[in-house]
Image (cartoon, rainbow, N blue to C red):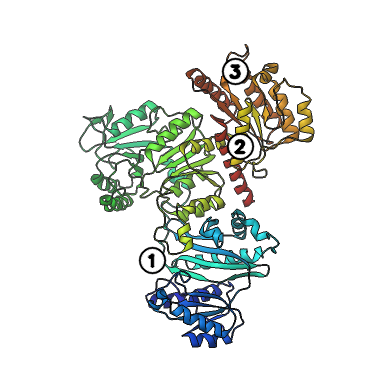
Amino acid sequence: MNAPLPSPSNLIAAARAEGRSALDEAAGKALLAAYGIRTPRSAVARDAADAERTAAGLTAPFVAKVVSPEILHKSDAGGVALRLQSPADVRAAVEAMAAKPAIAAARVEGWLVEEMIPAGREIVVGGFRDPQFGPILMVGLGGIFVEVLKDVAFRICPVSRADATAMLGELKGAALLAGARGEAPVDREALVDLLVKVGGEGGLLMSLADDVAELDINPVIVSPSGAMAADARFVLAAEPLPDVAETGAEGSRLEAFRPLFEPRSVAVLGASAKDVGIANTFIRRMKDFGYPHQIYPIHPSADEIEGLKSYPSLAAAPEPIDYAYVAMGAQRIPGVLAAAGGRCRIAQVISSGFGEVEDGKGLQEALVAAAQEGGVRVLGPNCLGTYSPRGGLTFPVGAPKEVGTIGIVSQSGGLSTDIIKRGQWRGLRFSGLVTIGNSADVKPHELVEYYLEDPQTAAIGLYLEDVKEGRAFFDLLRSRRATKPVVILKGGRSIRGREAALSHTGALAGDDRAWDALTAQVPAVLVKTVDAFIDVLLALQHLKLRPAKPTHAVTLFGNGGGSSVLGTDAFAEVGLDVSPFEGETLRLLEAMNLPPGTSVANPIDTPVRTLQEKDGWVAGEILDIVYAHARPDAVAMHLNLAAFVGRGSVDPIDNLFAVVEETQRKWPGVAHFCLALRSDGSPELDEKRRHYRDKARAADVPVYDEIPAMALALAAVGHLERQFAMRG
């Protein structure tokens, strides 16, 4: 019955030639078959009588379905009949369906008659074209699980077998695939094979990325004997995906962006000899920050600005410019950069009025073209500046001069100031922070690539609203070059939606599910708030990732019974385990005969009276037992500072830091150590917490204000460790 079928390109070309926006089911199944995906034997009949004759050549039971370019959702129109036992039943079913109002009013091209697939578990496999990342694969349990519970998992294509297996494991109903209520387990390997054929390297979605906008294979029937597609819906793309053009200089990103992070000369455009504008303020802040090289104000007529000799153009400056800060009228900027004559490496355009407003999109295109003419790479426009303590470059006031290991890229200038200042008080120190605004020229992934090459940077943080070249970004993070952890704070996750989706997959793909898929495939973690962003980066500043021992088992140790109980819940909510001790660990801790009110079961609840034993050094004895015998992946200590007020003449907390340092020396690599210092909000205790936070930073310990924040940070560390472990 199944004659040789046209190639995928011919099937799609034929549909487009007929003005179709989707493939009919027969063509869709032929397309699946071309990629080795099993479908039931079938044929298209002209009418009810032909359907009866067609069924006679197939094996019962049968399915009959309407074929119409005007009916995309056949079941909703009453155009599907199942479990037909004879050719005569097929004829009767077609006649009944043809009389239904929605079908009678449509242009019917025929009736698909096929053999009914044996019973099994219903699975939905789908795909869609994400505007940022390209083809995305989806899998979910069928029926109520996808319709109501939305039990689905996504991955960016191409997917590996490991990706496909992990997708199935993420489903809330994954246990059903192993058999439930006496059912036999399904053939998971056959389902994995199907997912790879759809979304793998060289698979359907990758090969037809320019043609397929949305795909539903719904349902796939998977049984102990294999997987078969019962229905397929292909929505064609109106236009091909845009090419990803690699931007910027060839060769090392280290050299390409060295002038940004370590500029040996800075020009300022937009400062005035008469007024004090943002460019004047920038010059003053650079002087206060101690920039060690020359600053050249650029002005068409002024002789001197802010006590510095001024020059009429970038080309007229006494030496080539590494970094130019541009805060002048938007309309004038393209001409100024075009005239740079190759004497300016990087210009950061602070000015707005470009692509962020409809009227400025043309001007933004002109800006990029003019910069290319002048040999300039452009950061921005519509941003605030760059902060690089190693290069003496800053835009916020009072930023720390100490060089750190956290590299930031941000599309928001204002949020960047929050990150720097709030991070400063939390103990975060930066290798650099770049605001990129509209990212008209330099794209986020280029700066990520710089940080990956930069020996000063240990971890990377990104605030993104539009990644610009999502495929290049994804390819970079999944490459072997991505050896450092990435933390992503994504803005606008809930506003894009897919209101015009024509498939189940498309409808389920709202709220930027691609970003969840991304962080399931690469060494990156997604956070929702600035506080969480800083919390995770703080952990990555101090803790060395251990892919061979991903963080899961945690010992919770501190004062306050209620806090310990709530803390255990907080760790459980993020997938970490605070389980009671057993065996030798518990025996040795109980043998310490600690003061009444102490619990050593895990969580270890030690009232202030206990922590004051031996002026706080008792904590070291407890930790030695935990590290030697329990050997957790992490130790999370929490201290309620208010409980120590007026409780004895010795402050045990100062000694605790010595204990922590000694423990880390004695037990290297056994467990991560984090500390939550809880305050009642009084100025006195907040000041003490600041003092202790400085001591903790010196001891290489991340400090949090509350236990849930510490739990979230350790969960992120565990996720990143597992991602690196999968790379081998």
Front: mark 3 or 2: 2
Which residue occupies the foreground of this view, 234 or 206?
234
Judged from the image, the secondary structure of the residue bearing numbered disc 1 is loop
Tell me residue 407's x, y (percent).
48, 39
Q: Which residue is mark 3?
A: 644
Crowding around mark 1 (Cα neighbors within 10 Å: few <14, some 14 to 19, many 20+) is few
Q: Left of 657 or right of it: where is 242?
A: left
Tell me residue 510's x, y (percent).
45, 54
Instruction: Report, in whole angstroms, how far the alpha carbon at label 3 lies from the one at label 2.
Output: 25 Å
Q: Is residue 124 visible?
A: yes
Residue 714: quadrant of the picture = top right
Q: Residue at x 75, y 27 (%)?
A: 589
Q: Amino acid at mark 1?
A: Glu
Q: Amino acid at mark 3?
A: Phe
Q: Residue at x 61, y 16 (%)?
A: 651
Instruction: Report, in whole angstroms, how far the alpha carbon at label 2 lies from the one at label 1.
Output: 49 Å
Q: Which residue is mark 2?
A: 569
Q: Amino acid at mark 2?
A: Asp
Q: Which residue is mark 1?
A: 239
